[in-house]
Amino acid sequence: MQIARSFVAVGLVLSMAGCATQSVWEQNLDQTNGDGTVALAPLGKAAPVTVRDIAWDRLQTTLGEIEQTRSSSDIHVSEWTREQRDAEKAKLLRGLQVSQSPQSVTVVAHSQFRTTDGVGDPRQTLPEVARKLGANMVVYSTRVLGKTDKIVQEPVSSNRSGTVWYRDTDDRYRSDNFNEQQTTWVPVRVSADEVGAIAFFLRVD
């Protein structure tokens, strides 16, 4: 759908300062739901967060079905009735294998991206992001999508030697030999695994 790229009718991408220190999940956050932006108070650092992984194909099938429903609707999503929005949310939660009642679950945000740098251990990185959002459950999925090219910086070392001339304290010219090693970083094209990742952050009451 473009829900696989954009889950709700009207999206608000979270702009956060200092992206360089954020996890890749946090850098790609989109905080939305069918009723507009959800802003919840952050959870405490020790608050429990449930993290689950689900099959990539199952999630993509669900998102594809939601996208198909949206594209075939004669009414823009922003004008959907409460019943239509609730039906879409229920479908999403079934796809996420969330058994709680849709009325007790708030879809706080989702994050989706492709990367050749890896995602680390989602079970270690996702809880911190969830707590900042006020979410207490994360459902995620990842898959290696194939090989792609990327540019990396590789060190190239070289040796340089020669002779330098100088004037000493007696005003006589003298020579001195030198030998030094230099390292230059050059761009190199390599093949790497491209990983697709998506996570939904939920608040279950």
Image (cartoon, helix red, strand yellow):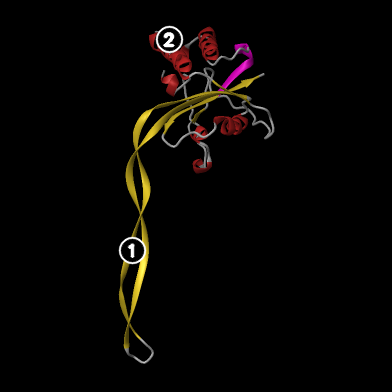
Residue at (60%, 30%) from the top-left corner? Answer: 127
Identify residue type, mark 2. Answer: Thr
**Mark 1, residues whose alpha carbon is within 10 Å: few (<14), some, or many (≥20)?**
few
**Mark 2, residues whose alpha carbon is within 10 Å: few (<14), some, or many (≥20)?**
few
Q: Is residue 187 above or below residue 164?
A: above
- Quadrant of residue 106 within the rendered picture: top right
Residue found farthest to the bottom: 170
Q: CA distance from mark 2 to mark 1?
A: 64 Å
Q: Is residue 190 above or below residue 112?
A: below
Tag of residue 159: 1
Image spot of residue 1 (x, y percent): 41, 18
Image spot of residue 58 (x, y percent): 48, 15
Residue at (41%, 20%) from the top-left corner? Answer: 2
Is 176 magenta? The answer is: no
| Residue labelled with disc 2 | 69
**Front one among 31 and 189:** 189
Residue at (43%, 9%) from the top-left corner? Answer: 69
**Front one among 189 and 3:** 189
Disc 1, SS? strand
Residue at (55%, 30%) from the top-left corner? Answer: 122
Disc 2, SS? helix
Is 107 magenta? The answer is: yes
Q: Nearer the viewer, mark 2 or mark 1?
A: 1
Identify residue type, mark 1. Answer: Asn
> In the image, which residues are magenta?
101-108
**Front one among 68 and 82:** 68
- Name the N-terminal-most of marks 2 and 1: 2
Image spot of residue 204 (x, y percent): 64, 19
Q: Is residue 76 above or below residue 196?
A: above
Q: Locate the C terminus and report the quarter of the image it occupies.
A: top right
